Amino acid sequence: MDYVRRLVGIHYLDESAIQTVQSKRDPPHVGIGLRPAAARPQQTPVIPQQGQVQTQPQTATTATGWTWDVSHKRYRRWDGGKWVWQE
């Protein structure tokens, strides 16, 4: 909406564009459902000091929350109380 208002403000779009965009918006209860940071499981970052060897395996997190565990060679996900392993 702000972008459309800006374009109307510089006379790139007609003012009727604001009403058109407003009519196409999703209702307020529809959204992507973000969780507050306090509700997400927190992980302590591993920052190796100069000259130290990193002891934890490197992981890669996917968009679904599954993390590749290098030492176990399979995916895992934190469910808030324990690790859940993907079979």
Image: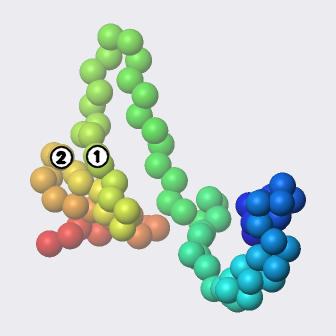
Circles 1 and 2: CB distance less than 8 Å? yes
Q: Please tell me whether residue 11 is drawn above or below residue 35 in the rendered image.
A: above
Q: Residue 58 vs residue 11: left or right? A: left
Which quadrant is home to the C terminus?
Answer: bottom left
For the point 77% across and 67% down, the residue is 13
Q: Residue 76 vs residue 74: left or right? A: right
For the point 72% across and 79% down, the residue is 21
Determine which of the numbered discs, if any, sits on residue 59 in the image: 1
Residue 33 vs residue 21, the one in the foreground: 21
Image location of residue 77, percent across then percent down: 33, 64
Q: Quadrant of residue 9?
A: bottom right
Q: Quadrant of residue 34?
A: bottom right
Mark 1 is surrounded, within 10 Å at the Cα level, by few (under 14), some (14 to 19) or many (20 or more) other residues, namely some
Name the secondary structure under disc 2. Answer: loop
Q: Quadrant of residue 8?
A: bottom right
Image location of residue 24, percent across then percent down: 67, 86
For badge 1, the amino acid type reads Thr
Image location of residue 42, percent across then percent down: 51, 53
Question: Which residue is disc 2 drawn over?
Answer: 70
Name the secondary structure under disc 1. Answer: strand
